Image (cartoon, rainbow, N blue to C red):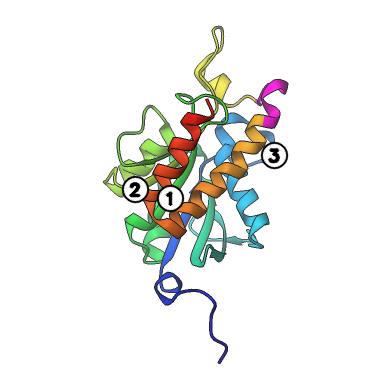
């Protein structure tokens, strides 16, 4: 039997990594769908196919940083994300501490990445629905800044809009950085990952 190149303690752990968004091409690369775009990038970078469906989500399984992962994009629409996340955790018997939710955040400047553990939803309805279904705030989030709502926009209109031309390069880079933040959590643990990536984001401001 071929010996794995990954440490045993990592191989025996499973993680559910969920990107939040809305299904359908009409929502591609909108601010609210940046979680989906990050999952797509992570799947591409790690040769994971997102062709399976389970509990109202497109999923793919594989390895990232030596850890077994399930990548998921719920197609329940953003405001009902918890309806998919809860049964996925139960089906794969994944503890809540091994859940990572990736989502857009209007309270952060465009492109800024922040790893957060616990706390409220901050008005994000997808995160709020996850909290309601899981009956806890105690899970990891990777927040991707999409910028505050400009004057003259309704919030729903803004988060469902695409990025301005001048924001394009920044947000594409942020998707890659968000994937790196997830990998850092898997390899180093949440505390060290927060120290690395949250500090890096502040320094780059």
For label 2, the SS is loop
The answer to whether residue 79 is left or right of residue 26 is left
**Dominant secondary-structure state across the stretch colored magenta:** helix
Give me the disc on residue 70.
none
Q: In the shown orientation, is residue 158 left or right of residue 128?
A: right
Identity of the residue drawn at 63% across and 62% down:
48
For the point 47% across and 41% down, the residue is: 197
Question: 101 above or below 94?
Answer: above
Q: Quadrant of the N terminus?
A: bottom right
The numbered disc on residue 25 is 3
Q: Which residue is at 38% across, 27% downward? A: 123
The disc label shown at residue 139, or none:
2
The residue pinned by badge 1 equals: 100
Crowding around mark 2 (Cα neighbors within 10 Å: few <14, some 14 to 19, many 20+) is some
Q: For the residue carrying disc 1, how many other residues have a C-alpha within 10 Å: few (<14), some (14-19), or many (20+)?
A: many
Q: Name the spot of residue 135 as percent of width and height, x first.
A: 27, 46
Residue 107 picture location, percent across and down: 45, 24
At 56% from the left and 26% from the top, the residue drawn is 110
User: Which mark sits nearer the N-terminus, 2 or 3?
Assistant: 3
Q: Nearer the viewer, mark 2 or mark 3?
A: 2
Would residue 76 be visible to someone looking at this image?
A: yes
Tell which of 188 and 156 is nearer to you: 188
**Residue 136 higher or lower than 48, as above or below:** above
Q: Position of residue 32 (x, y in %)?
A: 55, 32
| CB within 8 Å, label 1 to label 3 | no
Which x, y percent locates residue 133?
33, 46
**Inter-mark Cα distance, 2 to 1:** 7 Å
Q: Earlier in the sequence, mark 1 or mark 3?
A: 3
Span colored in magenta: 162-169
């Amino acid at each position: 039997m071929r010996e794995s190149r990954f440490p045993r303690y990592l191989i025996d752990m499973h993680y559910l990594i969920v990107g939040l968004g809305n299904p359908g091409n009409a929502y591609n690369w909108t601010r609210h769908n940046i979680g989906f775009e990050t999952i797509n990038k992570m799947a591409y970078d790690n040769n994971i196919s997102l062709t399976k469906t389970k509990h109202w989500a497109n999923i793919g399984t594989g390895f990232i940083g030596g850890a077994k992962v399930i990548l998921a994009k719920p197609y329940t629409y953003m405001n009902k994300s918890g309806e998919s996340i809860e049964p996925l955790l139960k089906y794969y018997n994944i503890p809540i501490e091994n859940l990572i939710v990736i989502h857009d955040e209007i309270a952060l400047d465009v492109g800024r990445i922040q790893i957060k553990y616990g706390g409220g939803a901050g008005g994000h309805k997808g995160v709020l629905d996850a909290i309601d279904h899981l009956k806890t705030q105690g899970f990891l989030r990777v927040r991707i800044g999409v910028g505050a709502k400009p004057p003259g926009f309704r919030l729903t209109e803004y988060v469902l809009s695409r990025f301005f031309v001048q924001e394009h390069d920044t947000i594409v880079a942020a998707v890659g950085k968000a994937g790196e933040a997830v990998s850092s959590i898997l390899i180093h643990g949440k505390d060290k990952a927060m120290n690395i990536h949250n500090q890096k984001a502040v320094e780059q401001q």
